[in-house]
Image (spheres, helix red, strand yellow):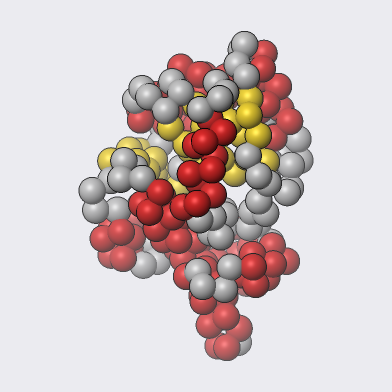
Amino acid sequence: MAKAPVPGLAKTRLAAAVGDEAAADLAAAALLDTISACREATADCSIALTGVLEDAFRAEEIRAALAGWSILWQRGEAFAERLANAHLDAGPGPLLQIGTDTPQVTAAQLRAVADVLTNHDTVLGPADDGGWWVLGRHDAAQAEALRGVPMSTSTTGDDTRAALVAHGLSVGLAESLRDVDTVEDTEVVAAAAPGTRFARAWVAMGARS
């Protein structure tokens, strides 16, 4: 799941502190890092996009990075609805769904999540802010449990797990990661993963300021 990194629309909480263009630049770097990790983990990748990619930062680089991917377009109003629809559009079979707020994620971590999924109906990776950064399922119909779950709250992770369990699904847990919403998050994640595009963009931003 990804939003085109368009200034004024991408990473709005972060933009309030660093500006629209800087936030879009960081969002583009995070998207590219996530694409790289997914591509290294598996050859079978899809992306569900929203927004106008042509208006985004690093649009040509993003398009090149997505070569060979299945490109879907998000549909629905509430984010939970768009998540469930994206799973349906991606089709049957095992799938790990992540966003772009964890640019530090590695292919090894994604493969570890896939290993957890082999022993459970679903798998959920908690985020430090109370949300989640990855959700895995064996069949698209299992993601119907997401509809109606309040997203972007401090209890989204617990609420999602409860919804999955209420649908009769077992839930394995992956490791917790910190996602990027604020300047403090950015500093911590960039320091923890200095080799990422995201970290380099953050360092370059500081050098320009």
Q: Horizontally, is 2 left or right of 145 in the view?
A: left
Q: Residue at x 63, y 58 (%)?
A: 180
Seen at 56% across and 25% down, the residue is 119
Residue 36 drawn at (x, y percent): 39, 58
Q: Residue at x 56, y 33 (%)?
A: 116
How many numbered marks appear? 0
In the image, 156 versus 209, the foreground residue is 156
Q: Quadrant of residue 159?
A: top right
99 is higher (above) or lower (below) than 124: below
**Residue 48 visible somewhere in the drawing:** yes
* Residue 4 is at least partly visible in this image: no
Residue 120: x, y in percent?
57, 23
Residue toward you, 171 or 9: 171
Position of residue 40 relative to residue 160, above or below, is below
Quadrant in the picture for residue 123: top right
**Which of 19/142 is in front?**
142
Residue drawn at x 54%, y 49% is 109
- Furthest-left residue in this view: 68
The relative height of residue 42 versus residue 141 in the rendered view (above or below) is: below
Residue 111, given in percent of the width and then of the height, sits at: 48, 44
Decide if residue 130 is on the left or right side of residue 54. Answer: right
